[in-house]
Image: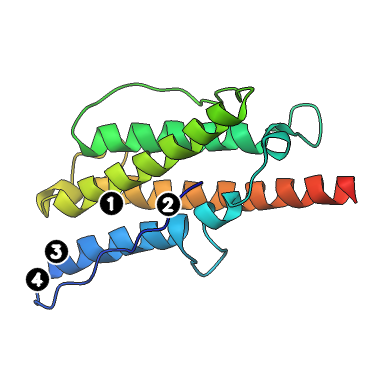
Amino acid sequence: MISGTHGPRRPASRDVDALARCDLARFREDTFARRNWGHQGLRAALRGLSLEEARWTPGRGVHSVWEQINHVAHWKRYVLERVRGRSRQTNQAWPPSGRTAAELHRALAVLERLHRDLQGAVLKLSADAFEVGGGPRYSTTQLLLGEAAHDAYHTGQILLTRKLYRRRRA
């Protein structure tokens, strides 16, 4: 459902800002789409996800995989808006899951598109944008690293939820 992409290549020049921007983009790409030091990546964690598995929850008050997909997408959208210089308030968001396979497919496509759009925005940032512009509390660099850490955290939750789902059925 989510297709693969390759991360940015490091420039051959000695431009430190370009190197740092590419390293940050690659770290984000590894966390989302490939394999970082801690897990297989969010894209791989979602591969083969069925409708029933996406909607299943291990207990009351525990988020489903689909809710986690929507939550990660919400925060990617928020970070993308910040990186683009648009400021908006947001609260902790756990959008509910949908009901159909088509809706799940759309949720996964939205997550993929947001990741791609954010990667493109990162690669276009000026050196000055990394020092300011992330918001009132964080620089852009901190915001982007936080977003990657958020992906990694929820990837672990998704992997655990899927493991519990499979064990329950065994």
What residue is shown with label 4?
Answer: 15
**Quadrant in which residue 85 is drawn:** top left
Crowding around mark 3 (Cα neighbors within 10 Å: few <14, some 14 to 19, many 20+) is some
Residue 135 in view in this figure? no
Identify the amino acid type marked 3.
Asp
Circles 2 and 1: CB atoms closer than 8 Å? no
Circles 4 and 3: CB atoms closer than 8 Å? yes
Question: Sequence-wise, which precedes: disc 3 or disc 2?
Answer: 3
Q: Is residue 146 left or right of residue 94?
A: left
Question: Sequence-wise, which precedes: disc 1 or disc 3?
Answer: 3
Does dot 3 land on a helix, a strand or a loop? helix
Report how far apart the C-alphas of labels 4 and 3 lie in the structure. 6 Å
What residue is shown with label 3?
Answer: 17
What residue is shown with label 2?
Answer: 148
Question: Sequence-wise, which precedes: disc 4 or disc 2?
Answer: 4
**Image x and y of residue 2, in percent:** 47, 48
Label annotation for residue 141: 1
Structure colour scheme: rainbow
Q: Nearer the viewer, residue 32 or 104?
A: 104
Question: Sequence-wise, which precedes: disc 2 or disc 1?
Answer: 1
Identify the amino acid type marked 4.
Asp
Identify the amino acid type marked 1.
Thr
Report how far apart the C-alphas of labels 3 and 2 lie in the structure. 19 Å
Residue at figure coordinates x 11%, y 50% from the top left:
128
Residue 23 in view in this figure? yes
Report how far apart the C-alphas of labels 1 and 3 lie in the structure. 12 Å
**Quadrant in which residue 121 is drawn:** top left
**Image x and y of residue 136, in percent:** 27, 33
